[in-house]
C-alpha cells in the first residue's frame, strides 16, 4: 500500500475475525461461476405464469410450481431454435443453463429449447384455445358458407412436394378437370402457422389489385402425423385466417381420426385430402349423365304437354263448330253495308255539287271585280294628286311670305349695322360685363370676320368709365 494511503474499510480486518472479505461484484461473480458450473445444462419442468415479448426479440418468462417460481429468458438468437412459441398457462419442459443476473441479485434460466410437458398438456392447451375461439363466435354455424357446385378455380394451401398435393390433383383430374393454384407452405415446424395463414389471406386478396384469377374454393391440406406435427393447424393465426376467409374453405388435415382447430373454423371438414377433392368437384361423367337424363325428361315432358294441348284444342274446336260458317253471314252483311255506303256517298257528292253550282252562278267573275277595283284606284290616285299639288302650292306661298321676315331677323344683318358678338373660349356668348373675367381670352365676331382679344382687368376698369371695354 502506498505511503500515506488511507486503507478502505473492506481491507481492514475486524478485530477477532478471520472471515474472507468480498466486494459485492466479487461475491456476485463468485456465485455466478458457482451456479453456472454446477447447473451448466439442466431441464426444468413448470407452468408458464408470465410471458413478455420484448421489442428487441428477447422473451422473458416465469416458470412456477406450487409456491416456487423461476425466472427465465430466451435470447433473440435462440427464439427460432426453441421449438415452440411460449404462452401463459403452458406446462413446458425447458432445457438450458442456470445463471445469475447480478443487476437484480436473482438467478434465472437461459432457455435454449422448450417442449410441452407431455401430450396431456398439449391437448389441454388445444382445448383451452378451442373454448376461447368458440366463445368469440369463430365456430358458429351461421358463419359457414356453402361450397360452389362447380368451381372454375381451386386454391390449395399445402406443401408443394408431399403426396397430398399429388393426390388432390389426381382426384380432381379424374373427377372434373379444373384450374388449380397451389400456394406452397411448410405444414409443420417453426413458422409453418404464419405461412399457412398468409396463404389463406393471399388467396383472398387475389384479383383485388393484380388482376389474377381469384379461386372460387380453397383447400387447406396436409397428411397425417403426430399431435405435435399438426400443431400449426391449431394456432390462433391459422384459425382466425380460416374464419375470416371470404372464399369457401375445406379443411383436410391429417387422417379421418385427426381433428384440429381449423376444422371447426372452416366451412366444411374433409376426413382426408382426397375426400376434400371429391367434395370440391362433381364427377364429370356423372354430371354428363345427369344432364342427359334431365334433357330426356324435359323433352318427354314437352312432348306430352304439346300432345295434351293439341288434343284439348281439337276438343274445343269441335265444341265451337266451323268458324267459316260463323263468318259467312257476317261477310254478306258487310257486303250489303258496303254497297249502301257507296250509294250514300255518291248521293251526298251530287247534292253538294248542285249546291256549289247554284252558289257559283250568283258570284261575280274575279276579273270583273278586279277591273272595278282598278277604276276606283285610278280615280283615287288622280284626286290625291290634285290635293297634294294644292298643299304644295299653299306651303310654297307661305314660305315665300316668311323668308323676307327671317332674313330681316338674321344675326348677320344685325352685324352689318355695326354690332359685334363676343364669345368666351368655350364658344358661349358674353351678354353682360360681369361675365367677362379680367385677363380672359375672347373672340369678337364682325359681319366680315373674327378677331381675338384679352380683357385687361385694371386698365379695362379705367377705360370702362370712358366707354371703352377692350384694348
Image (tube, helix red, strand yellow):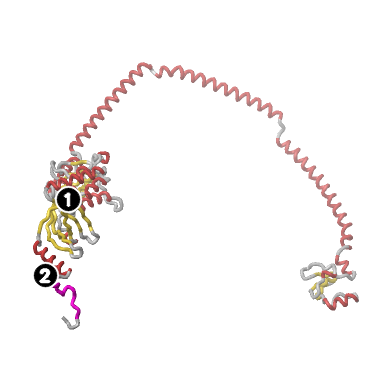
Q: 65 or 398: which is nearer to us?
A: 65
Magenta span main SS: loop
Indicate the position of residue 12 as horizontal and vertical percent values: 16, 75
Q: Residue placed at 12% from the left, 61% from the top?
A: 97
Instruction: Single out the residue that lies furthest toward the front.
Output: 16
Residue 235, x across and y down, in percent: 20, 49
What stretch of residues is rendered in magenta? Answer: 5-21
**Residue 187: horizontal and vertical position, in percent?**
16, 51
Among the two numbered marks 2 and 1 on one chain, the one whose residue lies closer to the N terminus: 2
Q: Quadrant of the C terminus?
A: bottom right
Q: Is residue 19 magenta?
A: yes
Q: Is residue 124 left or right of residue 405?
A: left
Q: Is residue 320 above or below residue 122?
A: above
Tell me the element at label 1.
loop
- Left or right of residue 59, residue 20 in this image: left
Front disc: 2 or 1: 2
How far across and down, in percent of the image, does residue 252 sit?
17, 44
Q: Nearer the viewer, residue 27 or 453?
A: 27
- Badge 2: how crowded within 10 Å, few (<14), some, or many (20+)? few
> According to the image, label 2 marks what residue?
19
* Res 184 visible: no
Drawn side of residue 60 relative to residue 454, left or right: left
For the view shown, which residue lies furthest in the left direction? 38
Q: What distance separates the C-alpha of mark 2 from that of mark 1?
A: 46 Å
- Per the image, the residue denoted by label 1 is 90
Q: Is residue 396 left or right of residue 287?
A: right
Amino acid at each position: 500500500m502506498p505511503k500515506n494511503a488511507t486503507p478502505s474499510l473492506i481491507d481492514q480486518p475486524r478485530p477477532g475475525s478471520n472471515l474472507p472479505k468480498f466486494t459485492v461484484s466479487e461475491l456476485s461473480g463468485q456465485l455466478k461461476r458457482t451456479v453456472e458450473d454446477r447447473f451448466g445444462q439442466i431441464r426444468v419442468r413448470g407452468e408458464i405464469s408470465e410471458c413478455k415479448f420484448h421489442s428487441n426479440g428477447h422473451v422473458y418468462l416465469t416458470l412456477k410450481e406450487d409456491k416456487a417460481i423461476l425466472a427465465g429468458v430466451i435470447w433473440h438468437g435462440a427464439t427460432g431454435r426453441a421449438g415452440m412459441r411460449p404462452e401463459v398457462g403452458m406446462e413446458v419442459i425447458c432445457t438450458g443453463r442456470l445463471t445469475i443476473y447480478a443487476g437484480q441479485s436473482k438467478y434465472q434460466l437461459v432457455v435454449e429449447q422448450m417442449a410441452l410437458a407431455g401430450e396431456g398438456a398439449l391437448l389441454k392447451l388445444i382445448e383451452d384455445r378451442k373454448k376461447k375461439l368458440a366463445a368469440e363466435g369463430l365456430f358458429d354455424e351461421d358463419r359457414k358458407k356453402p361450397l360452389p357446385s362447380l368451381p372454375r378455380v381451386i386454391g390449395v394451401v399445402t406443401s408443394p412436394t408431399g403426396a397430398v398435393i399429388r393426390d388432390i390433383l389426381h382426384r380432381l383430374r379424374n373427377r372434373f378437370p379444373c384450374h388449380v393454384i397451389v400456394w406452397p407452405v411448410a405444414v409443420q415446424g417453426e413458422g409453418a402457422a404464419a405461412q399457412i395463414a398468409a396463404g389463406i389471406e393471399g388467396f383472398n386478396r387475389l384479383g383485388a389489385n393484380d388482376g389474377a384469377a381469384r379461386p372460387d374454393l380453397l383447400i387447406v391440406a396436409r397428411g397425417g402425423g403426430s399431435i405435435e406435427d399438426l400443431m400449426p393447424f391449431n394456432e390462433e393465426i391459422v384459425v382466425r385466417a380460416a374464419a375470416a376467409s371470404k372464399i369457401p374453405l375445406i379443411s383436410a388435415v391429417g387422417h379421418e381420426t385427426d381433428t384440429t382447430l381449423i376444422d371447426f373454423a372452416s366451412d366444411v371438414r374433409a376426413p382426408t385430402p382426397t375426400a376434400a377433392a371429391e367434395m370440391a368437384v362433381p364427377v364429370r361423367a356423372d354430371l354428363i349423365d345427369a344432364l342427359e337424363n334431365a334433357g330426356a325428361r324435359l323433352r318427354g315432358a314437352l312432348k306430352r304437354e304439346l300432345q295434351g294441348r293439341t288434343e284439348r284444342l281439337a276438343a274445343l274446336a269441335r265444341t265451337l263448330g266451323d268458324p267459316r260458317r260463323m263468318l259467312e253471314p257476317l261477310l254478306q252483311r258487310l257486303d250489303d253495308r258496303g254497297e249502301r255506303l257507296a250509294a250514300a256517298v255518291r248521293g251526298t257528292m251530287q247534292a253538294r255539287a248542285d249546291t256549289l253550282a247554284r252558289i257559283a252562278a250568283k258570284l261575280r267573275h274575279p276579273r270583273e271585280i278586279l277591273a272595278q277595283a282598278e277604276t276606283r284606284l285610278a280615280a283615287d290616285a288622280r284626286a290625291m294628286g290634285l290635293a297634294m299639288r294644292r298643299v304644295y302650292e299653299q306651303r310654297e306661298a307661305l314660305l315665300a311670305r316668311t323668308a323676307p321676315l327671317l332674313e330681316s331677323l338674321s344675326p348677320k344683318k344685325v352685324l352689318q349695322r355695326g354690332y359685334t358678338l363676343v364669345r368666351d373660349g368655350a364658344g358661349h356668348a358674353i351678354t353682360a360685363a360681369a361675365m367677362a373675367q379680367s385677363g380672359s381670352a375672347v373672340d369678337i365676331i364682325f359681319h366680315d370676320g373674327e378677331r381675338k382679344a384679352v380683357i385687361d382687368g385694371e386698365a379695362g376698369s379705367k377705360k370702362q368709365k370712358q366707354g371703352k371695354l377692350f384694348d
